[in-house]
Image (cartoon, grey):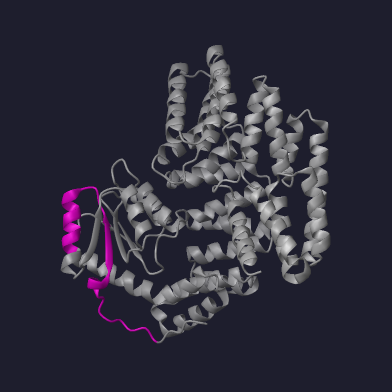
């Protein structure tokens, strides 16, 4: 049922009822902030001194107000905290996040604003200024919260109606409501209406989010050249609106303009170097362009700024050591000792950070053996290959497609053909529906039948999906079974088959019990799917539905 809203009034903000989290590593200033909030009437104040404790506190409770210093010493900084709170959904729709800083560098300001705090304050400031900022932010957040809640529930039509109503009744916040309206129209795929809205706003007065919206709709309508022109203009008119660079680089890459995509991302990371995901993407594209210097720089920054980030992964560590190895193999004059020491330091950091994960330790050992071969350190090559073979038997999850190619290439180069083929065989079974992966795998494998079988399994799977969409669940299940005979451990085929069995059990009561038991059995056989795998959410949901339907028999 749609939430209703009457004309918004501004009652006095009752800070005594607001829960407050203060994140500040300087004890004296933390006490000062507590005093300011106490003066406003706040009673429920929690104070933490580092980013890790802040994230933990927000996992245990969702706060109304968060005051976070930007620089928190060796722990996560304020930008990383805010990014993680958004990503892991640890904020209420009307939570207010204020960033506090003693810095005013472009990189800091850009990094902070990119993750959209509700406001930020530069030290020193007094209680009156803090209260003024909080009052404004709270009033705005409370007004927009009903629409934001509907959007969080993906109730786009209801949210659209409420956003329009709120804009009419509260002209002061019209622009924020229009932004919500645009997001709803886009999610409802009402592209023409979304384009009309954003184009009208841009014609009235260029606004970064509206300009971004025009480009997004061009992209959604597959008008890539118009999207390219729009985002190019946006980066010139709003050089600090970094999402414009991201979109432009994305489209350039899709169009095969890989050099141009790298140049676009380089401009963005120059302005906001602490954006970890952007640095990793720049490194990946630079590797394709064989630009070793940019590749090294990007992954070096990713390792540096990912030190306390929840979004750090082994990829940037391994790619950095790879780029160092490429420099050592090159003909240019380099400081070999410095590069060797850096590589060993990166490997040590990688192994320390991910010491509990056999899969990552396995990747690290292969990469270390590969690197040692470049430096002609035969003893270390043998040492790390032995470690890799020992770790391989302990891996409990599927390797990713990119990881499998990376590892197989290294193993082939190191003469470990048997292990390389084993990894390729498992990966082809899992990712036969990824044409780019299959193309790479076909160049590596010596097993002539492997790629042929994968194509046949893919054909059966596609036929089954066709029948499923046409609600012919009997034929869909038959073809999923044929595909699974070729690739019995393929997660997608197994999940597809389960979904078809559940649909048939709902449509045909005579087969219900047998279908549900079959679904349960298939799900029980999926044992190597880790929580980080993109397919895990679907697996969990199908498992939940299967058990629920069995209970209702």
- Where is 246 relative to 428, above or below? below
- Where is 512 relative to 172, above or below? above
Which x, y percent locates residue 475?
84, 60
- Where is 2 relative to 244, above or below? below
**Is residue 473 on the magenta stretch?**
no
Please report the residue visible at 70 percent of the width from the left and 58 percent of the height from the top: 517
Please report the residue visible at 43 percent of the width from the left and 41 percent of the height from the top: 306
Which x, y percent locates residue 119?
33, 62
The reply to whether residue 498 is visible in this rendering is no
Q: Quadrant of the C terminus?
A: bottom right
Q: Is 90 left or right of 278, judged from the image as shown? A: left
Q: Which residues are magenta?
A: 7-36
Residue 327 or 349: which is nearer the viewer?
349
Please report the residue visible at 49 percent of the width from the left and 80 percent of the height from the top: 162
Which x, y percent locates residue 127?
18, 64
**Is residue 27 on the magenta stretch?**
yes
Query: Which quadrant holds residue 39?
Result: bottom left
Q: Is 295 left or right of 447, judged from the image as shown? A: left
Residue 67 or 202: which is nearer the viewer?
67
Counting labels gives 0
């Amino acid at each position: 049922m749609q939430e209703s809203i009457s004309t918004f009034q501004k009652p006095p903000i009752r800070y005594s009822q607001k829960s407050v989290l203060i994140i500040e590593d300087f004890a004296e200033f933390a006490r000062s902030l507590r005093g300011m909030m106490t003066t406003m009437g706040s009673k429920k104040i929690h104070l933490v001194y580092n980013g890790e404790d802040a994230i933990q506190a927000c996992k245990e409770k969702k706060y109304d107000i968060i005051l976070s210093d930007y620089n928190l010493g060796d722990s996560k900084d304020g930008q990383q905290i805010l990014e993680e709170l958004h990503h892991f959904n640890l904020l209420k729709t009307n939570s207010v996040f204020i960033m506090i800083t003693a810095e005013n560098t472009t990189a800091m300001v850009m990094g902070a604003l990119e993750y959209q705090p509700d406001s930020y304050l530069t030290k020193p400031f007094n209680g009156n200024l803090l209260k003024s900022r909080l009052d404004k932010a709270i009033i705005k957040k409370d007004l927009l919260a009903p629409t934001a809640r509907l959007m969080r529930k993906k109730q786009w039509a209801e949210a659209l109606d409420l956003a329009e109503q709120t804009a009419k009744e509260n002209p002061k916040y019209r622009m924020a409501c229009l932004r919500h309206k645009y997001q709803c129209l886009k999610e409802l795929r009402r592209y023409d209406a979304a384009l009309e809205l954003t184009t009208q706003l841009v014609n009235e007065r260029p606004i970064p989010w509206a300009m971004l919206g025009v480009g997004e709709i061009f992209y959604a309508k597959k008008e890539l050249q118009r999207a390219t022109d729009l985002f190019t203009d946006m980066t010139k008119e709003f050089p600090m609106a970094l999402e414009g660079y991201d979109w432009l680089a994305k489209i350039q890459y899709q169009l095969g303009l890989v050099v141009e995509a790298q140049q676009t991302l380089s401009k963005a990371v120059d302005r906001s170097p602490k954006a970890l995901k952007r640095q990793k993407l720049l490194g990946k594209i630079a590797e394709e362009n064989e630009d070793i210097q940019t590749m090294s720089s990007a992954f070096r920054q990713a390792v540096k700024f990912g030190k306390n980030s929840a979004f750090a992964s082994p990829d940037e560590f391994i790619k950095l050591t790879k780029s160092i190895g490429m420099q050592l193999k090159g003909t240019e004059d380099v400081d070999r000792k410095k590069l060797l020491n850096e590589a060993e330091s990166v490997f040590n950091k990688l192994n320390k950070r991910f010491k509990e994960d056999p899969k990552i330790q396995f990747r690290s050992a292969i990469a270390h053996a590969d690197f040692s071969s470049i430096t002609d350190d035969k003893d270390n090559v043998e040492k790390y290959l032995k470690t890799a073979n020992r770790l391989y038997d302990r891996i409990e999850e599927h390797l990713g497609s990119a990881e499998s190619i990376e590892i197989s290439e290294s193993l082939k180069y190191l003469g470990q053909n048997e292990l390389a083929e084993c990894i390729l065989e498992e990966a082809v079974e899992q990712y036969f529906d990824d044409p780019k992966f299959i193309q790479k795998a076909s160049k590596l494998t010596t097993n002539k039948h492997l790629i042929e079988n994968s194509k046949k399994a893919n054909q059966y799977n596609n036929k089954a999906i066709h029948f499923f969409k046409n609600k012919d669940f009997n034929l869909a299940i038959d073809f999923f079974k044929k595909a699974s005979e070729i690739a019995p451990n393929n997660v997608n085929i197994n999940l597809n088959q389960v979904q078809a069995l559940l649909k048939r059990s709902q449509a045909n009561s005579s087969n219900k019990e047998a279908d549900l038991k079959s679904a349960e059995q298939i799900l029980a056989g999926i044992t190597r799917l880790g929580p980080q795998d993109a397919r895990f959410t679907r697996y969990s949901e199908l498992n939940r539905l299967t058990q629920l339907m069995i209970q209702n028999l």
